[in-house]
Image: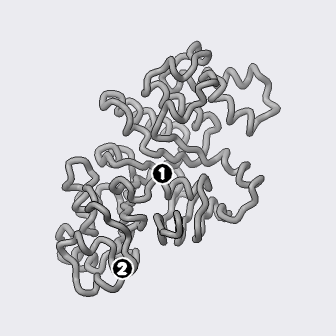
C-alpha cells in the first residue's frame, strides 16, 4: 500500500451561504493520479482550491500526511506549499506578464530556498526548461512571446521546480488546441513517472482522464457520488450519473437550466431513470459497495449484484 498523502473528510465550501461543495470524502496516495470528473459548474475547481486553501472551506477536514491543513497557522501553510503545487487552466493568465519565464520559474526557488546562490538556481531553471520541452535560452522571454502550449509548459515547470509531492492539475489542457493537448498530457505523465508525484487531475475530457488516472472520482453538484478504479469505472459505473457522463459526447452532460442543489433527497433524482420514492427524501451517503468502489446511490449494490451498468 502506498503512503496516504491526502485525506479529505466532509469538506464543505459555501458561497453566499449556499453550499457549492458538500460532504466530500476521498483519499489520495503517493504516486497515484486521481481523476476528478463532472460537468461544468459541479464544483471541481472549487474543491481543488479549498484543499490547497486558496479559498476558505466552511467545514470539514483536509489532512496532508496526517496534518490538518484547514486549521494550521499561515506560516506553517506557507511551508507546506513546497509540496503542494497547482497547474491552472489558463496558461498565459497564470503567468505574470512583467516577469520573464526564468523569473516566473525562479519564484518558488526564491521562496523556499532563499540562500541558494544565483548560479545554482539558474542551472535548475535551465534544466527544468529543457525537461518540459523548451530551451534554456527561452528563459529571458516574456509570456506574450509564447504560444498557449508553451505557456502551459512554463506553468508545469514552475510547479515542478520544487519536486512537489502533490500536483493539482485544474483543466490544464482544456484551453489548448487538440494537437497540443496530447503533448502536455504526455509531459505530465512522464514527469509523474520520473518524480513520483501524486496528481489530482481535473478535466471534463474523459479520454485524457482515462489515460492518466489510476482511480476516478465523480462529482455532481458539489457532492462526490462515485469513486472507482479507472478500468472498472469505464467498464461499469455504479451511479446513474456515471453512465450519463460516459454516454455524453463531451463527457459532461449539460445540467437542466436553472438547476440548483436541493435540500433533501438525492440531488440527481430528477434526472435519474432509476429513482425510487426513497430518493425523494433520503440523500444516499457515499458508501463502499464492494472493495475499492464507492457510490452514493440507493441502488448501487443492486446494480452491482445484477452485473448491470447503472
Can you identify the residue that label 2 sits on? Answer: 284
| Furthest-top residue in this view | 137
Residue shown at 56% from the left, 23% from the top: 129
Image side of residue 123 versus residue 263, left or right: right
Question: How dense is the environment of label 1, judged by Cα within 10 Å: few (below 14), some, or many (20 and up)?
Answer: many
Image side of residue 230 versus residue 305, left or right: right
First in sequence: mark 2 vs mark 1: 1
> Given this view, does label 2 or label 1 mark the residue nearer the observer?
2
Give whichever of 153, 266 is nearer the camera. 266
User: Which disc, if any, is residue 200?
Assistant: 1
79 relative to 89, above or below: below
54 relative to 175, above or below: below
Q: Quadrant of residue 43?
A: bottom left
Split into 4 quadrants, where in the image is the C terminus? bottom left
Give whichever of 33, 241 is nearer the camera. 241
Residue 67, x across and y down, in percent: 68, 63
Helix, strand or loop under label 2: loop
Amino acid at each position: 500500500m502506498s503512503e496516504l498523502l491526502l485525506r479529505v473528510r466532509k469538506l464543505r465550501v459555501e458561497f453566499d451561504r449556499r453550499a457549492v461543495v458538500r460532504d466530500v470524502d476521498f483519499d489520495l496516495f503517493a504516486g497515484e493520479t486521481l481523476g476528478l470528473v463532472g460537468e461544468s459548474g459541479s464544483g471541481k475547481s472549487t474543491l481543488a482550491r479549498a484543499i490547497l486553501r486558496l479559498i476558505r472551506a466552511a467545514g470539514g477536514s483536509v489532512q496532508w500526511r496526517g496534518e490538518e491543513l484547514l486549521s494550521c497557522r499561515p506560516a506553517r501553510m506557507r511551508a507546506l506549499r513546497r509540496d503542494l503545487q497547482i497547474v491552472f487552466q489558463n496558461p498565459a493568465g497564470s503567468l505574470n506578464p512583467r516577469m520573464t519565464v526564468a523569473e516566473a520559474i525562479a519564484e518558488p526557488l526564491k521562496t523556499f530556498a532563499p540562500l541558494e546562490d544565483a548560479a545554482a538556481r539558474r542551472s535548475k531553471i535551465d534544466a527544468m526548461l529543457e525537461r518540459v520541452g523548451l530551451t534554456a535560452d527561452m528563459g529571458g522571454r516574456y509570456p506574450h512571446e509564447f504560444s498557449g502550449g508553451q505557456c502551459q509548459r512554463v506553468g508545469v515547470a514552475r510547479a515542478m521546480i520544487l519536486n512537489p509531492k502533490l500536483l493539482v492539475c485544474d483543466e490544464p489542457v482544456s484551453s489548448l488546441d487538440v494537437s497540443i493537448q496530447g503533448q502536455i498530457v504526455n509531459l505530465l505523465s512522464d514527469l509523474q513517472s520520473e518524480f513520483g508525484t501524486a496528481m489530482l487531475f481535473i478535466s471534463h475530457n474523459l479520454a485524457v482522464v482515462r489515460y492518466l488516472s489510476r482511480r476516478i472520482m465523480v462529482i455532481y453538484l458539489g457532492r462526490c457520488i462515485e469513486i472507482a478504479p479507472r478500468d472498472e469505472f469505464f467498464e461499469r459505473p455504479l451511479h446513474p450519473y456515471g453512465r450519463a457522463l460516459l454516454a455524453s459526447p463531451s463527457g459532461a452532460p449539460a445540467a437542466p437550466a436553472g438547476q440548483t442543489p436541493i435540500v433533501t433527497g438525492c440531488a440527481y433524482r430528477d434526472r435519474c431513470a432509476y429513482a425510487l420514492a426513497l430518493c425523494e427524501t433520503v440523500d444516499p451517503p457515499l458508501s463502499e459497495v464492494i472493495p475499492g468502489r464507492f457510490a452514493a446511490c440507493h441502488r448501487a449494490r443492486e446494480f452491482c449484484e445484477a452485473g448491470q451498468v447503472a
